[in-house]
Image: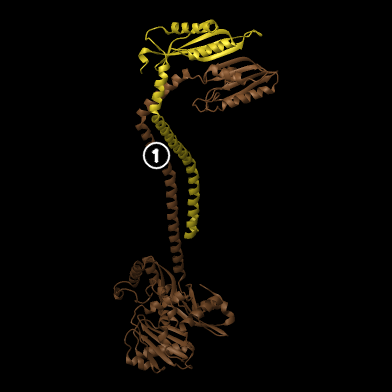
Amino acid sequence: MTGNLSLRDRAILLGVVVLALYGLAVVLWFMKFDRDWSKSIKSYESAVKTYRREAALIAKRDALQAQYEEEQEKIPVLPEDSPSDTHWMALLTGLAEKHHVSISGKKPGKEEQEDVLSKLEVEVEWTASLSSLVKFLYALETAERAMFDVRSIGVATSGRNTGYLKGKMTICCAYLREEGKDK
Amino acid sequence: MESGGGFARQAAEAWSLAAESVAPDTDDAALDRPVPPDGASADALPQEVADEAQPAAEMLAQAFHEASQTFKTREFVLSVPLSRLLVRVVRVPVDERDDIIDTAQKELEAVSPFPDGSLAVGVETVAETDREIVAAVAALPAEAAGDISEALTAAKVCVTRTDVTAFGRLRAFWPQICAKEGVSRRLVLMNLDDGWDIVVLDDGAPVFLRGLGAEAKTSEELARDVTLSLLQASGLSKPIEEVVVFSETKVDDAVLDRLATFGPVRLAEMSGDEFESAEGVAQRTVEGATCDVTPEDWAVALREARFKKKMIVGISAAMAVWLLVMGVFFGVPFVYGQLTARQTAQSRRHQAAYRAVKSIETKLKMVQGYSDREHGALMLLKRISDELPAGARLREFRYTRGDSVFVQGDVEQDSVVYDYKNALFALRDGDEDGAKLFPGGVELSGLRQNKFRLDAVLKDPEEDEAPVRATARRRAK
């Protein structure tokens, strides 16, 4: 078919074919390379972000260490083998009685270990006036030689216009065992 | 090839310029351009041309090759001696100016010894009056240029223009030819490397041109050829007022004596520059002389060579662009890969220190998780109670640290619930210390018959784990 074409025509035809292939290749390749580009650019940006975040954290080493030591001082320490549930239940009961919170049920969980920190969760069913509840909660937060944290609480009115509230709360008692104190 | 009156006027101007000897206007730089060897002469050919053992085409090819190397070009202007050309001077009426090429074509085809061959005719107007145009027409039959074609092909060079050597010589020698003024008919004889050329000039315009070939001529033979030439020119009626002789070799006295029978002989001095006639051709090319007898196959070869050159440049440019595009396509991911690897290596170098600090931070957050009072149950209960609008009663409060707050109550007017929500929104956005009471948001999830229910999410959306909507969780339960 191309036998009758002059050199110029053949060259033009070849050029057109090459250009068409060029365009097709660029389109196809660009679609692939676009993904590769995005992926490689995102990888790089992620690596930079990670490095900066890590470097920033390393720069805060002394401040974090000081802060941790300060917080650690507030954590109560129990002897290594002493039972924790009786210790904390007694303390909780005492605080509840002191602030006129009636505890109808207590259910201690198992002692759990989170890194160096030990914790014991106690589920409590209670009834109290609003002021007693507030005082009790405040007492839990400010108790000495103890670190109580109310993980959850449900408060609802107790019947119609009785002025009393009732509900459940989960109190977490955090502490250190003597062996893990200085870790 | 140009045709019609335009070309004729241009040619006429070129000849008049030549006649006025305006050589000083010549572009000197142009004269320095590559000047090809005379096609049929040995002007620019090496001495070996004289060696008859070597075929002429081969010698010519070698000369082309050397010239190509010297002048760094593959395109030449060539001039061909009269002995290879069909040359006529034609006269056409002025009103047939546009038909001058056809006339020339017919004229030359009539005298061509190669009736089957097509002729590429070169036309140059040499004189013009009110009534007629005098034009020198020439053609180079392909059969007479076979050796040149072979040489051009062998040397891989092309011809952009083919002139008549005699025209170049006339251009170069014009000041000497016209040295004597007031001459009407002048006979010019040029004995150069390719033998005798005879030109009859009437009032400065060539009316007859003839090449006698390279063979040596006796005085009688030369006189006979001159007589025949004058007869062909316009008869012997018009007297020869001057015979101008150019010769690069000494002319025999017998020849000069015999020529003197036609008219007073003047032996013009030559500069001794062997490229003088080539310079004449170069000048004519610069001045835009129209006579071009380039055969069609040479012109085709030139067009193809130029096109090939353009094609090669185009393909090279396309390849370069292609390489550039590929370089960018492959290079960008590669460069980013390298940068990422370098960044990762930097991270790896401080991993030990990072892990140590991360451990401290983790422990700190863990401890703070139990000692944080700002987001504790008591503080939340206080803030929600503080913001409770007048006339509203809180019926239920549920709190889970780090997860959600749920509030339900009664109101006297529905609108106050929205005020309440707005107040909680303010707490969501943080107070003066920047602490956010409800990092995740506050949602009014139910309102009917003076009862309201509000959900708030306590999980910080900036944390890795997505916020958990308390309502959704409760509904799931």
Q: Is residue B60 left or right of residue B329?
A: left
Q: Relative to residue A24, is residue B149 depicted above or below?
A: below
Q: Residue at x 41, y 90 (%)?
A: B243
Q: Relative to residue B311, is residue A159 depicted above or below?
A: above
Q: Colour of chain A?
A: yellow
Residue B54: percent from the left, percent from the top?
Answer: 30, 72
Quarter of the image for residue B340 reads top left
Observer-nearest of B271 and B38: B271
Per the image, label 1 sits on a secondary structure element best described as helix
Q: Residue at x 69, y 19 (%)?
A: B448
Whether residue A6 is visible here, answered yes or no, is: no
Scheme of image coloration? by chain
Residue B425: percent from the left, percent from the top?
Answer: 60, 26
Whether residue B470 is visible here, answered yes or no, is: yes
Q: Colour of chain B?
A: brown
Q: Is residue B369 left or right of residue B356?
A: right
Residue B105: percent from the left, percent from the top?
Answer: 51, 76
Q: Relative to residue B277, is residue B448 depicted above or below?
A: above
Q: Is residue A87 left or right of residue B66?
A: right
Q: Amino acid at mark 1?
A: Leu
Determine which residue is flagged by label 1.
Answer: B339
Q: Relative to residue A2, is residue A107 depicted above or below?
A: above
